[in-house]
Each structure stands twice: as structure tokens, then as C-alpha cells.
Image (cartoon, grey):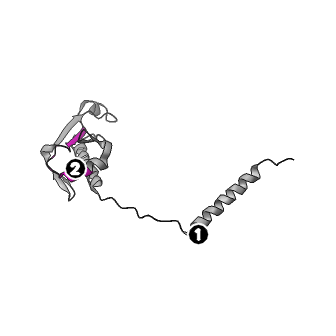
């Protein structure tokens, strides 16, 4: 089943690589003997599902989460492999959606005159408090 990443693009099932292992944690013998932890990897650098500019954006935004061009997410909270697979698919889609969300530009602002005056008054008050803490000067 292909993985849809919002309206941006769709990752074909053939490009997704699954690995399963024992999850550890609570669950007793079931957790120790069954491979329920799901690890989903997608080779971003070799994918034909996205354009080059999108690939660069994702790589730049995700930074260290992209190792050697591969994005990997892990899900092992549930005792069910099927549920962990669904969680891993959702995490990968959410991660990619977040990376593709447009960055909001910062609107530069300046402090108002009253804010500047208030800051200066606070500095003067703190300075006066510190002067009062000094030992008296003996001549």
C-alpha cells in the first residue's frame, strides 16, 4: 500500500523497506519472542517519487535525521506488529509533512519607546539595589 504524504506526493510501497525485531519492554515472553518492533526506512536520495528541489528541502529541514540519504522511523510501543507498522507509516508521513511545511518569515520589530524606558528604569533600580549592598566607605 502506497504512503501518501498529504497533497505533496505519494511514496510507492516498493520504495519502503521494513525491518522487524523484538521490541523489549513490557509484554513478557510475547515481547521477547515476537518481532513486533517495526522499523520503516525510505531511501530519499534514490526515490523517484519526488522532485530534486523537494528532496533538497527535506534533506535540509530534517538534517541529521537523514543518514546517507535514508530516513528511518521506529515504532515499538505496541505488542502488535500490525499496529506498530501503522504507527511507523504515520510517523514517516508526519515527519515529511512537517519538513515540507512552508517556513514562516520573521517580521522584524523594534521595542517601543515605553518598553525602552521601562528597561532603563529596571536597570537603574537593579543598580541602586546593588549599590546599597556594598559595604560603607570609611575614610
Q: Is residue 90 visible?
A: no
Q: Is residue 52 magenta?
A: yes
- What range is drawn magenta here? 36-57
47 sits to left or right of 107: left
Q: Quadrant of residue 23?
A: top left
- Residue 68: x %, y % from top left: 24, 38
Q: Quadrant of residue 121?
A: bottom right
Q: Is residue 38 visible?
A: yes
Q: Is residue 68 positioned above or below 11 on the image?
A: above
Q: Residue 55: which numbered mark, if any?
A: 2
Query: What residue do we see at 23% from left, 47% from top?
Result: 89
- Residue 34: x %, y % from top left: 23, 33
Q: Which residue is mark 1?
A: 114
Q: Earlier in the sequence, mark 2 or mark 1?
A: 2
Q: Secondary structure at mark 1?
A: helix
Furthest residue toward front: 139
Cβ atoms at labels 2 and 1 below 8 Å apart: no
Q: Is residue 114 magenta?
A: no
Q: Please give the count of numbered marks on the rendered protein.
A: 2
Amino acid at each position: 500500500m502506497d504512503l501518501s504524504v498529504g497533497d505533496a506526493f505519494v511514496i510507492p510501497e516498493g520504495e519502503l523497506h521494513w525491518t522487524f525485531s523484538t521490541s523489549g519492554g513490557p509484554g513478557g515472553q510475547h515481547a521477547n519472542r515476537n518481532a513486533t518492533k517495526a522499523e520503516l526506512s525510505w531511501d530519499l536520495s534514490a526515490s523517484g517519487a519526488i522532485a530534486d528541489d523537494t528532496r533538497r528541502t527535506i534533506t535540509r529541514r530534517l538534517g541529521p535525521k537523514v543518514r546517507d540519504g535514508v530516513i528511518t522511523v521506529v515504532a515499538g510501543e505496541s505488542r502488535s506488529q500490525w499496529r506498530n507498522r501503522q504507527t511507523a507509516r504515520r510517523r514517516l508521513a508526519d515527519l515529511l509533512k512537517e519538513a515540507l511545511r512552508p517556513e514562516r518569515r520573521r517580521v522584524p520589530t523594534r521595542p517601543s519607546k515605553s518598553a525602552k524606558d521601562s528597561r532603563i528604569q529596571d536597570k537603574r533600580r537593579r543598580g541602586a539595589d546593588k549599590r546599597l549592598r556594598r559595604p560603607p566607605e570609611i575614610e
